[in-house]
Structures are given as C-alpha cells and as structure tokens.
C-alpha cells in the first residue's frame, strides 16, 4: 500500500502530494505549482541581475570620475 506525503494511506490513482486530487504524481496541480515556482524564480533572478547591472554602472561611473580627478591633479588644474 502507498502513502501520501502526510503519512496517510494513498488511494490508487491519486497524487502523493495532492491526495484529494485524482491523477498520479506528478498531477496537473503539481505541474501548475512547478510552473508558478519557475515564474517567481525567474522574476527573482531578473531582479537581481538588474541590481547587479545598476551596481556595475555606478562603479564604472565612479571609476571614470576618479580617473578624471587624477588627470586634473596631474596637469595642475
């Protein structure tokens, strides 16, 4: 006899994760949850990539500013 993820007996033909939903694992509810998780994971990755791009742009601007200050000091402005 099989068990669901809660330790209860699993009826034949039902999902282990969604024991009240007919369909073997992974059922359509499992797939829907997986797709939702993938969507939010991608949103999070995009957010952190944008933060990284902003940080890199700020560091590059600061580097250019430092370079300009150094050049002015060298020529005595």
Image: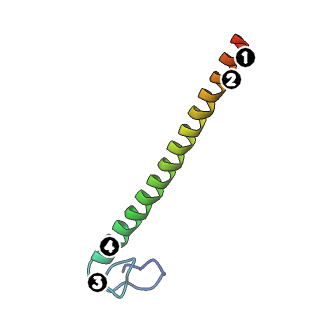
- Kindly report which numbered mark, 1 or 3, lies closer to the viewer in this rendering: 1
The first of marks 1 and 4 along the sequence is 4
Which residue is identified by label 2? 69
Packing grade of label 4 (10 A; few <14, some 14-19, many >=20) is few
Residue 12's disc number: 3
Write the residue at 72% across / 16% down: 73
Write the residue at 37% across / 72% down: 33
Image quadrant in which you'd find residue 26: bottom left
Q: Nearer the viewer, residue 49 or 10?
A: 49
User: Do tag 1 and tag 2 residues touch (Cβ < 8 Å)?
Assistant: yes
Separation (CA) of disc 2 from disc 4: 56 Å
Which residue is identified by label 4? 32
**SS assignment at label 1:** helix
Separation (CA) of disc 1 from disc 3: 81 Å
- Residue 37 % position (x, y): 41, 66
The first of marks 1 and 3 along the sequence is 3
Image quadrant in which you'd find residue 17: bottom left
- Kindly report which numbered mark, 2 or 4, lies closer to the viewer in this rendering: 2
**SS assignment at label 2:** helix
53 displayed left or right of 17: right
Which residue is identified by label 1? 73
The first of marks 4 and 3 along the sequence is 3
The first of marks 2 and 3 along the sequence is 3
Write the residue at 35% across / 88% down: 20
Packing grade of label 1 (10 A; few <14, some 14-19, many >=20) is few
Packing grade of label 2 (10 A; few <14, some 14-19, many >=20) is few
The correct choice, above or below, for 55 with respect to 11 in the image is: above
41 displayed left or right of 69: left
Separation (CA) of disc 1 from disc 4: 62 Å
Image quadrant in which you'd find residue 35: bottom left
User: Do tag 2 and tag 4 residues touch (Cβ < 8 Å)?
Assistant: no
């Amino acid at each position: 006899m099989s068990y669901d993820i809660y330790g209860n007996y699993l009826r034949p033909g039902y999902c282990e994760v969604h024991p009240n939903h007919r369909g073997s694992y992974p059922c359509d509810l499992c797939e829907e949850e997986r797709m939702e998780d993938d969507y939010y994971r991608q949103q999070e990755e995009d957010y952190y990539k944008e933060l990284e791009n902003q940080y890199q742009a700020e560091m590059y601007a600061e580097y250019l500013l430092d370079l300009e200050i150094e050049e002015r000091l060298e020529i005595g402005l």
